[in-house]
Amino acid sequence: MVLASPILTNHQLTTKLIGILLISLPHTLNYKMDYQFKDIEQKWQQFWADHQTFKAEDNSTKPKYYVLDMFPYPSGAGLHVGHPLGYIASDIFARYKRLKGFNVLHPMGYDSFGLPAEQYAIQTGQHPAITTETNIATYRRQLDQIGFSFDWSREVRTSSPDYYKWTQWIFMQLFNSWYNKAIEKAEPISVLVKHFEQHGSGDINAVCDEEVLSFNADDWKAMSHDEQQAELLKYRLTYLRESTVNWCPALGTVLANDEVKDGFSERGGYPVEQKKMMQWSMRITAYAERLLQGLDTIDWPEPLKEMQRNWIGKSTGASVRFPIENQESRVKSQEYIEVFTTRVDTIFGVTFVVLAPEHELVKELTTPEQQGAIDAYITQTKKKSELDRMADTKTVSGAFTGSYVLNPLNGDKIQLWIADYVLAGYGTGAVMAVPSGDQRDYLFAKHFDLPIVPIMDIQQIETEADPTKDGRYINSDFINGLFYSEATKAVIAKLEEIGAGKAKINFRMRDAIFGRQRYWGEPVPVYFKDGLPHLIEESELPLVLPEVDKYLPTESGEPPLGRATGWKHPLGDYELSTMPGWAGSSWYWYRYMDAHNDSEFASKKAVEYWKDVDLYIGGSEHATGHLLYSRFWNKFMKDMNLVVEEEPFKKLINQGMIQGRSNFVYRLLLQEEDLSQTQYFLSKKQADRWVNTQTFGQELLDEWNIDYKIKYYLENQQRLAYGSLHVDVNIVNNDVLDIEKFRQSRSEYNNAILVLEDGTLSKPGDVIKGNYICGWEVEKMSKSKFNVVNPDDLIARYGADTLRMYEMFLGPLEQSKPWNTNGIEGVFKFLRKFWRLFHNDQWVFTVSDAEPSKAELKSLHKIIRKVEEDVERFSFNTSVSSFMIAVNELTDLKCNNKAILQDMVIILSSYAPHICEELWTLLGNEAGTLSYATYPKFNGTYLIEDEFAYPISINGKTKMNLSISLSLDASATEAVVLANADVLRYLDGKAPKKVIVVKGRIVNMVV
RNA sequence: GCUCAGAUGGUGGAACUGGUAGACACGCAGGACUUAAAAUCCUGUUCCCGUAAACGGAGUGCGGGUUCGAUUCCCGCUCUGAGUACCA
């Protein structure tokens, strides 16, 4: 590759020898050079850093614009070429907005608490802080190389005590708050305490635990302090409770639902089991309705909103109480079974009720005769893993408890069953089964021979359930003959009247577990006294993560923090679990607003100025994690008057995932003993011939001059086999293998013989003539597949400006696509061509002050408008094409006009900032002023055309083009067309039945 | 199963409100320059028929429909990708 070497003209040198000298000493000789991206990029990156060019002002007469990227977890592997995709897009947008006169906040930081650094610590003993520090340095170096316009003065790291002090502080605010449903808002817990003191718990409408006490003001005052605190904990927005959690023994921690995929941990893929534990939780369910409603007010991708809606899982229905049939022999702790249903209208079709096997009443409702069957069933269910239970949705299983419940509306006696298709975690863990309308109930009824009662006159239930809502009710008491909506109302009214049920909205979303039994996270600012949690004082923040000897649980099974010696609050023991990964990322965009404030998470002034994020770019994998939790915390902070906006991220764009594109070589499988000495590889086309060979294949070996005995056959067919092997994509260019590097890559390839695309052989030591073409496939980008492309390598070869533009040129930002370096040369050539516009044949910078021509102005104003439109709708790939078109046009026009080129520099600068900064100063502007230049103003008059080359089509098929003045109206244009000799020839003497003329667009004739 | 997104040359993709399908780029083929290579430049490149050009035909996953005109709108189907799942 000699891309960076100077172009040498004839008069400058006469022999090649001098050329070699020049290449090795380009800086010492004062020759003018071709586009030297390396020097240019280093120079300007240094300049931006030295001058803090992108430092955002906290007050400005300009309107504010906040462009945010999802900050990365600094992993040890560094950035691969897929990571910067979103950062490049947001950077282009941020730079564009500055040119458009906005005060832009474009910060970056690190989500630096997390599992990988801790796993590494467990294996090596290296403190996660050190690993994290090293990784951050790598990330910073890689990010700097790409030329981002981040305001680094605002950098945040979630693992830094200055930062997590405020994460802990927000935790304390949540602990000190409760959710008042009466006003749909969180309030300080002191408000609740005051209410209890004056009125007791009677008329409180709060989001709280299920089993809260009922008391009056005097009862409250009579309680001990600890009793009061225990009760208040049931109301706090962050609270402790025993809950079934996803326990991952291999990681030694609890995982959130969104961190578990199909029964295995998302990170690492270890098995996850259910376990009951005392856990910190966040009452996110309090905000379920607001989280749902808020989606309608924000500009996010529809699929992402849909994912959040599904996750929140609102369903409207009714809760119904089925009285348990009196059985004197037993004591009932509860007199009824409560179910949730979305089809309360089908209540007269209920022929049995099913409980989840884990339901708390199962034990006491099982009759002695059924005890054996129930116990056997529960044992069987417990054995089934979560995975089996999900995979096996076909088998019907269950057991009869022996007890009965009564239909609350007509007193019918109904069998009470248990079955594992009813989930303990959803609704009330009990369902009313309507086999005529629900397919699962139908299968259950068929299997256990339970009655199936039709309830609609049009229901077809011979072979399956029919969930129709159309038709009139039958077998349904007082709703017989009614339609769906009136029946539903009538049933709910009746249930309410007799106190057996009410309309209810149910959410699938659960409260979020807020604790991890791990080391590398924020300590929870809580100590325990007499079994009750107490917040530490604000003045004691930050509660710094203590040192430990090992990053493993203690012998007694406590989290790693249990190992810390002398880590104890004066009044009690500290909480030993740490906060989950999403804690630090749930508010970080506010810290950027005022990153160095040590008395507040961010000053009121800063928050009121920057308000919210105008544009957020990141991956859709955070749909139900980070993006939901952030909205939750934001809403809470809004309720507390800490922030000003209800929603944190006004507009969100998902960049697509970059997949890997693997390359393959095809190795002939010949005799084993020979394999160890010389290996043969087939180029793509020859490998395809090999596969398609109908016969033995020996003739192909003869053709290639390979004299070998064949060892492997494919399935007794007389065909030869070859094996596909991954080859490092970094020694492949446009699917052409670098044969020398390939031979050097592994010792067993040193003597490899390659059958090239044209069928000739390439032996070691031969002069290489011809290509070896590799096969390819789209796979995940990973080291094991040798398809990881590192941005550093590409920057070294082509420069950051080329990388930035190429990543955008690859396709629409939101679309997932495989990374493919083929084609990067095209973008590189474009930048050189752009550079050449400003230089003469001797690479001397030369521009003219002449008046721009009409054609030049037209090219310029086309691109002014195009880039504006494209950037505003985030269509970055199309503007790269347009830049190429513009530069091609200006090259054809031999344009070196200063006025035109200077505007071009401004427009291109958000995409390729380094080259543009260099040209901007060469044009005589002050260094560093380009970033705050003014985007050129579009003037449509340069684009007005006198004529248009109308496509002339017959029956919708274009036949020819015809230039016609645009001053003519439709009928005059039609006359010109019909008078044209070529048109008449196409019409072949016939008159068209109809002529459609769309001015400035098309002429179509119907014959 | 359900929800969503998508399917356009050898490849990545463009065509924004229905109006010249294949912009731009890669690759490929041919040519210029060069002792040669690299770099650079020029020409061609959807497919089929045809030596080539003119000309003709087909064509945006498949089958229909609306329209003067459909990659775009409507109906049905196939395939691919993503998310989600006994959610009562």
Image (cartoon, coloured by chain):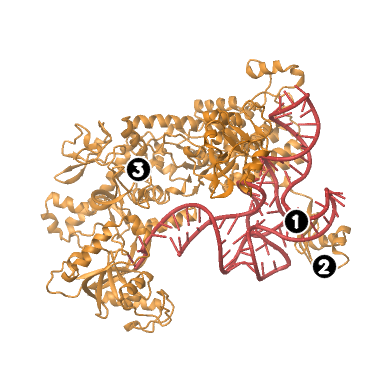
Q: Which residue is mark 2?
A: A992
Q: Are marks 1 and 2 on the same chain?
A: yes
Q: Residues within 10 Å of mark 3 (few under 14, many from 20)?
A: many
Sequence-wise first label, 1 or 3? 3
Q: Residues within 10 Å of mark 2 (few under 14, many from 20)?
A: some
Q: Which mark is residue A1000?
A: 1
Question: What is the spatial separation of the Cα atoms under label 2 and label 3, in whole angstroms?
Answer: 72 Å
Q: Residues within 10 Å of mark 1 (few under 14, many from 20)?
A: some
- Secondary structure state at the residue bearing disc 3: loop
| Chain in red in the render | B
**Which picture quadrant has residue A846?**
top right
Asked if residue A275 is positioned above or below residue A322 in the image, the reply reads above
Q: Nearer the viewer, residue A320 or A781?
A: A781
Sequence-wise first label, 1 or 2? 2
Q: Nearer the viewer, residue A861 or B82?
A: B82
Question: What is the spatial separation of the Cα atoms under label 1 and label 3, in whole angstroms?
Answer: 58 Å
Q: Which residue is mark 3?
A: A581
Location of the C terminus of chain A by quadrant is: bottom right
Question: What is the spatial separation of the Cα atoms under label 1 and label 2, in whole angstroms?
Answer: 21 Å
Are the residues flagged by discs 2 and 3 in contact, CB closer than 8 Å?
A: no
Q: Is residue A902 visible?
A: no
Q: Nearer the viewer, residue A756 or A231?
A: A756
Q: Residue A258, position in %: x, y?
A: 37, 50
In the rendered structure, the colour chosen for chain A is orange
